Amino acid sequence: MKKIILSLLFAVLGFALTPQELAVDVNYAGKERMLTQKITKDVFLIALGEEKAKEDLQKSRNEFERILYGLIEGDSELGLTKITANKKALQQAEIIKKKWLEFRKHIDKVLDGDYTQEDLNYIKNHNLELLQEANKLVELLVALNPTDKTENAQAINLAGKCRMLSQRIAKDVLILKKYPQESLTDLKRTIEELDLILDALENGNRKLGVKKTSAPWIQQELKKAREIWAELKKEIQNPQDVKKIVQLSDQLLAQMDKITKMYEAIVNKGRKIRAIKSIVEMFEKEKELQKHIINLAGKQRMLTQKMTKEALLTAIGYDPTSNIKLLKEDMELFDRTLHGFLYGDKGLNLPAVEDKKVKEEIVKVVEVWKPFKKEVENFIKTQDKNSLNYLVANNMKLLERSNNLVQAFKKAFPSYDFLEEARKEIVDIAGRQRMLTQKMTKEKLLVMLDIEKEKNRQNLKETIELFETSLNDLLNGNKKRKIVRPTNKKVIAQLKKVNSLWKDLKPIYLKEKLSQKEMDKLVEGNVKLLKEMDKAVLLTERVVDY
C-alpha cells in the first residue's frame, strides 16, 4: 500500500521540482550564503575576545553542513528535496562540499581553541569564495522552473540574500577591526547591494526579476526591515560600537529570515499532497534511519580490528606513515560515532539515543574505549611497544562490546514485518563482513609475528570460514538466519564483485609464509575488499527493493 501511494505521488509530482519544493530548496540554499558570512563573523568575534560566540559558531557550522548534505541527499525533516535530478545543481553542490570541507578544518581549530593567525587569514581570504559558490547554486535552483514560478523563487532568493548581507556587513566591520589595513571596498559594495535589494523587494525591479508584492503583511515587514537597516547603516558610518553593529545585523537577519519564509509560504500550495507525501516519507525515513544506525554501529566493530591491523603494520615497518595517518583517522571516527550515539551528530545523521538499554550498552563500550583510545594516541606519537601490546590484548574486548551495541540497537528498533526484520539482519551481517576483512588480516599479521601463533592461526581459520559462509548466505539467502536472497541487480553485482576479490585473496591468507609481493597483494587487496564490502553494506541499507 505504501509503495502504491508513493508511486501515485511521484507520478503526480514528476521528476522536476514542484514550486513548493523549489521554494524550500532556494530558501535553504540561500541560507547557506548567509551562514558563510555568519560563520566568518563569529570567528572574528572570537578572535576579538568574544568567547561566547563559540556556541553560535558551532551551531552555524553544523547547520551549514546539514543543509549542504540535505540538498545533495534530501532531508525530509527540513523539507529539502535532493537536487540529484539536476546535473548542474548537483555538480555545484559538490564543488561547495569540497571547498567547505577545507574551510571547516580552520573553523574546527577556532572552536578547539588552538587556531593560529594563518587560520584567521585563511578564513578571511576564502569566505567570499565559499559564498560565491553557494550563490551560484541558488541561481541554478532559481532557474530550474518556468518564469511564472521563478518570480516567486527570485523573491525568496533576494530576501534570503539580505540575510547574508546583514552578516557580511558585520563580518566586514569585524575584519576591519582586526585588520585595520584592509580595504573598505567590500563593505561599501555590501551596503549598496543591500540598499538595492530592499528597494527592489518593496517596489519591484525588472532587472532583478522581482515584482512588488501584493501581500500587505510582507510590505509591513519590509518596512520594519528598512527601519532596522537605517539604524544599522547609521552605526556603520562611524563604527565605534562594534557590539551594537553585530546586534543590529542579527536583528536584520531575523527580520529578513521572517520575510523569506513569508515569500516561501506564498509558493506553498497543494499542501494536502505534500502532507500525504510527508507522512509516507516519515515512515520510510524511520526505517532507513534504523538501518543507517545499525550500519554505523556495525562499522564500529570493523574499526576495532582495522585500528589494530594498522598498528601492527606500523610495528613491522610496512608503510608506517600511511598506517599512522589511517590509525589516527579511524580513532577519530570511532570516537565521533560513539559520541554521536549518545548526544547526536547531524553530520553523521545520528539522533541522540533515547532507549535506556541501548544507552547502557554505549556506556559499556565507552568504558573499554577510553583506555584503548589513550593507548592508540600514545602509539601514534611514540610507536611504543607496550601500547601495541595493549591494543593486541584488548581489541577483542572492544569488538565484543561494540557487537553487543549492534544487537541492542536491533532489539530496540520495532519491526513491522518479516521483510523489515530480515533487512536489519542483512545490514548487520553485511556490516560484520567488513569487520571480518580486518580481523583476518590482523590475525594473519599476528601469526607472521609469532604472537600466540597457534591460537591466532586457529582464529584466522575460523574467521575465514565465517566470512565465506556469510558471503554465500548474502548471495544465496539463508532462511534459518533470516537472510533473504537478493533480487536487486546492483546488490547482486556488488556481492559478486566482493566474492571475486575474496577468491583471489583467500589463498594468500591460507599460505604460511609470504613473499614481499604476496604481502603487498594481501595489504592492497584487503583495502579493496573492505571498500567493496562497504559499498555492499550501503546498498543493503539504502535500496528500496532488496
Image: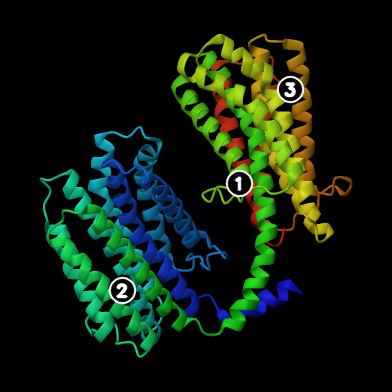
Q: Nearer the viewer, residue 344 or 45?
A: 45
Q: Do the residues labelled 3 and 2 touch (CB within 8 Å)?
A: no
Secondary structure type for disc 2: helix
Q: Which amino acid does label 3 sit on?
A: Leu
Please indicate whether residue 31 sits to the left or right of residue 407 in the image: left
Q: Which of 18 and 525 is in front in this view?
A: 18
**Given the current orientation, which residue lies at the most extreme right position?**
480
Q: Distance between the residues labelled 1 and 3?
A: 24 Å
Please indicate whether residue 434 sits to the left or right of residue 171 in the image: right
Q: Which of 295 and 441 is in front in this view?
A: 295
Going from N to C along the chain, the mark reached first, 1 or 3, is 3
Quarter of the image that includes the C terminus: bottom right
Q: How far apart are marks 3 and 2 (CA)?
A: 62 Å
Secondary structure type for disc 3: helix
State how many labels appear: 3
Are there few (<14), some (14-19), or many (20+) residues within 10 Å of tag 1?
some
Going from N to C along the chain, the mark reached first, 1 or 2, is 2
Q: What residue type is labelled 1?
A: Lys
Q: Do the residues labelled 1 and 2 touch (CB within 8 Å)?
A: no
Q: What residue sits 56% from the left and 19% below the top?
A: 375
Q: Position of residue 282 (x, y in %)?
A: 65, 66
Going from N to C along the chain, the mark reached first, 3 or 2, is 2
Quarter of the image that includes the N terminus: bottom right
Would residue 429 be seen by someone viewing this image from the given angle? no
Q: What residue sits 24% from the left and 58% below the top?
A: 245
Q: Which mark, by number, is residue 420?
A: none
Q: Mark 3 points at which residue?
A: 460
Secondary structure type for disc 1: helix
Q: Name the residue under label 1.
A: 535
Q: Mark 2 points at which residue?
A: 158
Q: Is residue 70 above or below residue 456?
A: below
Q: Where is residue 477 in the image (x, y as percent from the top left)?
A: 81, 49
